[in-house]
Amino acid sequence: MASNDRVRVRGLSIYRPIIYGNTAVVLTQKEREALSTPDHTHRWTVAVRSAASASDSDIVGGADDLSYFIKRVTFKLHDTYSNPTRNVDKPPFEVTETGWGEFEIQIRITFVPESGEKAITTYHHLKLHPWTAVGSNEPEIPPLDAAMKMGPVHSWQYDEIVFNDPFQSFLNVLLANPPTPLPKTKRRPVPFHTANPASLDASRGGVPEFTQAMEKEEAERLETARKQVITEQDRWREKLIEKEKELERLRKQLGPN
Ligand code: SLL
């Protein structure tokens, strides 16, 4: 072990953008008959990937191999699955299964031992059914044949793994593996969460993509919300001061006692 391996770089934070989530497709009648479990209606893949997508790929995210800092991803599936705890020790960090229902998947990310970092746990709600709202009301689950025409369902969450005070040696590893930057704007004309792919862009199958523009929009939403909170705070503070003054007045009216 080199002498600087266990030295922490104090005050430094470094992050890596990831996405986690799932894609799902409806199985054809033929595919269903070929299964030992013909009640299964969908094939899905749950994954942890780098946030940027490869430019020529229809896969959401995954431009970079994350194994320089991730050692293992554990996906904990619903108990209706055999061996529900699935450990994936090399990329791609994903599990593909068939099934009939949506459920919560626990995702545990273990880092390479050199990082000295504790594992982190997050959750993803496996999404099988497309986002559709009939009329302007409640979303409804469309029938399978209609869902099939809509193409794959995507449900992905962007996140950043932040390493604070990293070990010098681990920092070197991170710096040697810079993440592929997100594209500035969408290269694909697909709105993200309304992913209703076939109807919008049949040629590309409606694959969503994370972009810097989305990051900027999110930052703007946060900034607007922050300002609103401050305005509200000021308003309530003024009210409080007013009420305290009033209280003081009333006390004085009551006289000593
Ligand atoms: C629901 N709470 O009722 C959920 C549970 C479980 C999904 C969904 C496969 C099971 C198997 C499967 O799709 N489980 O292979 O036996 O909707």
Image (cartoon, rainbow, N blue to C red):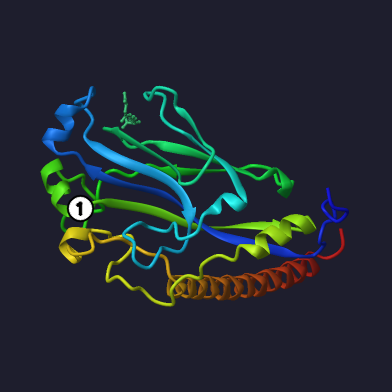
Residue displayed at 66% across by 75% down: 238
Which residue is situated farthest in the front direction here? 2
Instruction: Give the percent coordinates (x, y) of residue 249.
Output: 75, 72
Q: Amino acid at mark 1?
A: Gly
Instruction: Give the percent coordinates (x, y) of residue 211.
Output: 43, 70
The one of 100 and 234 positioned closer to us in this rendering: 100
Residue displayed at 17% across by 62% down: 202
Q: Which residue is mark 1?
A: 151
> Would residue 205 appear left or right of 68 to someone viewing this image?
left
- Dividing the image into four equal quarters, which quarter contains ligand 1? top left
Relative height, residue 52 to residue 2 (above, below): below
> Would residue 208 appear left or right of 222 to someone viewing this image?
left
Give the structural element (helix, strand or loop) at label 1. Answer: loop
> Would residue 15 appear left or right of 254 to someone viewing this image?
left
The quadrant in which the C terminus is found is bottom right
Residue displayed at 27% across by 39% down: 43
Instruction: Give the percent coordinates (x, y) of residue 53.
Output: 41, 63
The one of 239 and 157 positioned closer to us in this rendering: 157
The one of 227 and 76 positioned closer to us in this rendering: 76
Residue displayed at 20% across by 66% down: 201
